[in-house]
């Protein structure tokens, strides 16, 4: 289990403090605020791994939509804290891009298990794919218990890598809007523990050696991506990080 930064929003700070203390004893960094305006202010200055929030947050200027938090910090996982809600509100919650819904009063053990599961789920940054293709790939990965985020180009990817920790950056070579070698070098320099998987077409075979020499974890061929093979590579990366041992044998990009 890795440490994580957790932001909790609740108008009754006194009631949420015992939960914060439990999470801090588990090794998490916990910040609590009592309203949405303070949450927005924090998220404009820094990122969090997980947000615990009611579906309608107190104190937000204007109409509250918890999706705003995702726009401020796209890589952040959202856990909705729910009490007794109307059916319409629940339908809106379940239709949003959130990771979990937990009910009050808290079952602390289950909540901690949910947080641990989220933080142990592989996080993937998808770079350079066209919108529809990127979203389809993201959905496929999330169906296989990976958390994925899509960015349009290498420049946006570098900004995300600087602010967030990803297990794997998946790069569509030739589609990032910048030099792919430069992107790879920047990712590895910024976050050495983040692995880069490069998607190449057969006309770019000559780049494989350079990409691997610059720190790419492996190269896989497009456009006919074997999603199960990609997931195996992602799982391999996670396993290697957990064991902190010698690098495992990597699959050949030619297989």
Image (cartoon, rainbow, N blue to C red):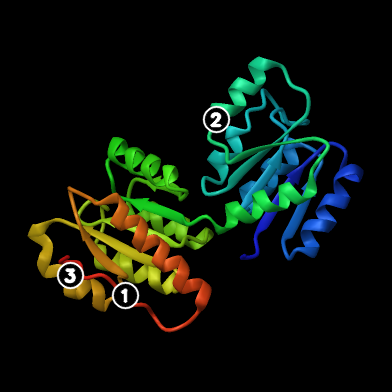
Residue 255 relative to residue 176: left or right: left
Q: Nearer the viewer, mark 2 or mark 1?
A: 2
10 Å crowding of disc 1: few (<14), some (14-19), many (20+): some
List the residue tagged with mark 3: 208
Picture layout, residue 226 above or below residue 88: below
Question: Residue, x 38% and y 43% (percent of image)?
Answer: 138
Specify the quadrant of the image occupied by residue 99. top right
Q: CA gap, disc 3 to disc 2?
A: 39 Å
- Mark before the other along the chain sequence, 1 or 3: 3
Question: Residue, x 90% and y 43% (percent of image)?
Answer: 15
Kind of element beneath mark 1: loop
Residue 113 relative to residue 171: left or right: right
Q: Position of residue 77 (x, y in %)?
A: 58, 46
10 Å crowding of disc 2: few (<14), some (14-19), many (20+): few
**Residue 151: in sight, yes or no?**
yes
Q: Count of labels shown?
A: 3
Kind of element beneath mark 2: loop
**Residue 191: in sight, yes or no?**
no
Specify the quadrant of the image occupied by residue 133. top left
Q: CA gap, disc 1 to disc 3?
A: 11 Å
Q: CA gap, disc 2 to disc 1?
A: 36 Å
- Mark before the other along the chain sequence, 3 or 2: 2
Q: Quadrant of the C terminus?
A: bottom left
Kind of element beneath mark 3: helix
10 Å crowding of disc 3: few (<14), some (14-19), many (20+): some
Name of the residue lying farthest toward the bottom: 246
Q: Position of residue 25 (x, y in %)?
A: 80, 64
Name of the residue lying farthest toward the left: 203
List the residue tagged with mark 2: 96
Closer to the camera in the image, 121 or 69: 121
List the residue tagged with mark 1: 215
Q: Position of residue 130 (x, y in %)?
A: 27, 41
């Amino acid at each position: 289990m890795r440490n994580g930064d957790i932001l909790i929003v609740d108008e009754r700070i006194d009631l949420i403090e015992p939960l914060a203390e439990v999470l801090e004893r588990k090794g998490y960094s916990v910040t609590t605020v009592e309203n949405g305006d303070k949450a927005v202010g924090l998220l404009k200055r820094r990122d969090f791994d997980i947000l615990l929030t009611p579906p309608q947050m107190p104190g937000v200027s204007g109409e509250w939509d918890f999706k705003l938090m995702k726009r401020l910090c796209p890589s952040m996982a959202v856990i909705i804290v729910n009490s007794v809600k109307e059916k319409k509100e629940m339908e809106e919650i379940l239709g949003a891009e959130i990771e979990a819904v937990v009910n009050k009063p808290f079952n602390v053990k289950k909540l901690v298990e949910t947080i641990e599961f989220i933080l142990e789920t592989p996080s993937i940054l998808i770079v350079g794919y066209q919108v529809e293709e990127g979203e389809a790939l993201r959905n496929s990965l999330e169906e296989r218990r990976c958390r994925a985020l899509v960015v349009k180009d290498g420049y946006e990817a570098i900004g995300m890598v600087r602010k967030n920790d990803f297990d794997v950056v998946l790069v569509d070579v030739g589609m990032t809007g910048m030099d792919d070698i430069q992107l790879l070098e920047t990712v590895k320099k910024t976050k050495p523990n983040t692995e880069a998987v490069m998607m190449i077409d057969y006309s770019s075979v000559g780049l494989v050696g350079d990409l691997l020499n610059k720190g790419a974890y492996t190269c896989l061929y497009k456009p006919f991506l074997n999603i199960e093979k990609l997931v195996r590579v992602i799982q391999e990366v996670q396993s290697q990080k957990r064991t902190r041992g010698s690098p495992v044998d990597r699959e050949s990009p030619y297989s």
